[in-house]
Amino acid sequence: MENSDIKLKIPSANFYIEPTRAFIGNLAQSLGFSRKRVADIQLVLDEICSNAVHHGSVDATVGVKLRIRIDTNSLEILVRDTGSRHTGEKNWLTHERLSEIEANRSPCSESGHGIFIAKSLADTYEMQPNAAGGTDVRVVFGRLKPSDLKL
């Protein structure tokens, strides 16, 4: 399965996140990621897909696109949404909005933690507006080779 590209499109509904999470978990496990790292990958995927569904989708029919890229060194996941649920509002994740989310993040709040979790657990985290008026979130997880484990 080296150097593969997998493309998925799921409806913009919470119901479809869990099967996608299970698929990515099984894929990561088959690629040799540790159980802890598989759980990290699944959590990051859950958070960025949830953000795409809740904040970046007009309705369930539009969908969220995923591109999973596998190579000898990494597992890369790109999640693309098409824009806000709010009419006329595009690219809700501006630099100013991200700064506001970071500043207002609180342990007592149910929201605002997904971006922080994804940034903390992924080896690479990038977020940018896309041509569809939505947001692309790209995360990369490095794969360890047996030689990396030697002391």
Image (spheres, rainbow, N blue to C red):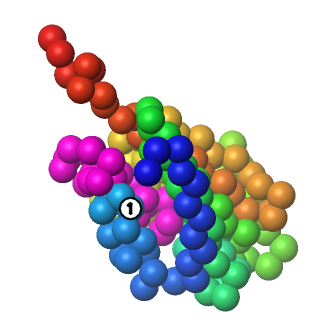
Q: Is residue 56 above or below residue 123?
A: below
**Residue, disc 1:** 24
Residue at screen point 27% across, 44% down: 33
Closer-to-camera residue (130/106): 130
Where is residue 79? Give x, y as percent: 58, 59
Left or right of 76? Residue 127 is right
Tell me the chief SS of the magenta region. helix
Residue at screen point 48% across, 69% down: 50
Q: Residue furthest front?
A: 1
Residue at screen point 45% across, 81% down: 16
Amino acid marked by disc 1: Ile
Left or right of 140? Residue 135 is right
Residue at screen point 83% across, 58% down: 131
Q: Which residues are magenta?
A: 28-51
Closer-to-camera residue (40/117): 40
Whether the magenta-drawn stretch holds residue 12 is answered as no
Closer-to-camera residue (99/140): 140
Q: Residue furthest top?
A: 151
**Disc 1 element:** helix
Left or right of 56? Residue 141 is left
Residue 126 makes an appearance in the image = yes
Whether the magenta-drawn stretch holds residue 39 is answered as yes
- Work out which quarter of the rendered image holds the C terminus and state it: top left
Left or right of 39? Residue 17 is right
Q: Is residue 9 above or below residue 121?
A: below
Where is residue 94? Give x, y as percent: 71, 49
Residue 96 makes an appearance in the image = no
